[in-house]
Image (spheres, grey):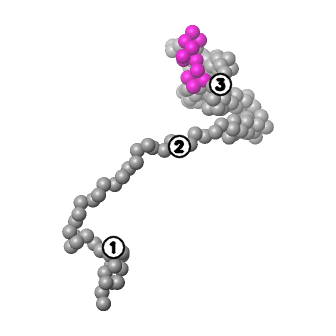
Amino acid sequence: MPNFQSNSGNDSANTIAALGLRWAALRGMLGSPLINAEDQKPLRDELLQELQSIGQAMSDIAARNSVELCAKIDVVSEELRKMAGDEDDPAQTLLASIRKDVMSLTPRAAPERSSVQLVRGHSPHRGLEAAPPTEAVRAGEAAKSP
């Protein structure tokens, strides 16, 4: 049976991002209809226990930015949704509002402008017979004619 125990001894693996990915993977596994089979009950119980330990580990780590803070809010929101089972739960609405506020308080980085300027090279000169006349050329020729 696979071992889903936390990597509490390895600090680099216990970042909000790493824990969030593990949490999402476990939620995905628990969402599978195969895991609900009676012969998979020990694995399901182990996954649920690991999910709880990930939630605890996330609560022990300070979020470093708004994305990590929103990840923590998402975990709490999902746990509340699972417990309450109500989509219109006021706590869910409050958490969604907090998440939106956190994201709006964080300044968005302006897209960096490239320091490379694309300049079109001079196209090779084509003979006048091959080049279709433009409106400016036609207007110039019309002004020259008597």
Mark 1 neighbour density, 10 Å: few (under 14) some (14–19) many (20 or more) = few
Q: Pinpoint residue 7: horizontal percent, then vertical percent.
A: 56, 13
N-terminal of the pair, mark 3 or mark 1, is: 3
Foreground of the two, 84 or 32: 84
Label 3, label 1: how far apart the Cα atoms are: 61 Å
Residue type at mark 1 is Thr
Q: Which residue bears the numbered disc 1? A: 134
Front position in the image: 71 or 127: 127
Q: Is 47 drawn above or below residue 145 in the view shown?
A: above
Look at the image and give the residue range highlighted in magenta: 8-19
Sequence-first disc among 2 and 1: 2
Q: Specify the amino acid type for callout 3.
A: Ala
Which residue in the structure is indicated by mark 3?
A: 63
Say which quarter of the image contains residue 107. Answer: top right
- Give the labeled residue for mark 2: 111
Confirm or deny contact between disc 3 and disc 1 (CB under 8 A). Answer: no
Q: Residue at x 36, y 52 (%)?
A: 119
x and y, in percent, of residue 108 in the image: 60, 40
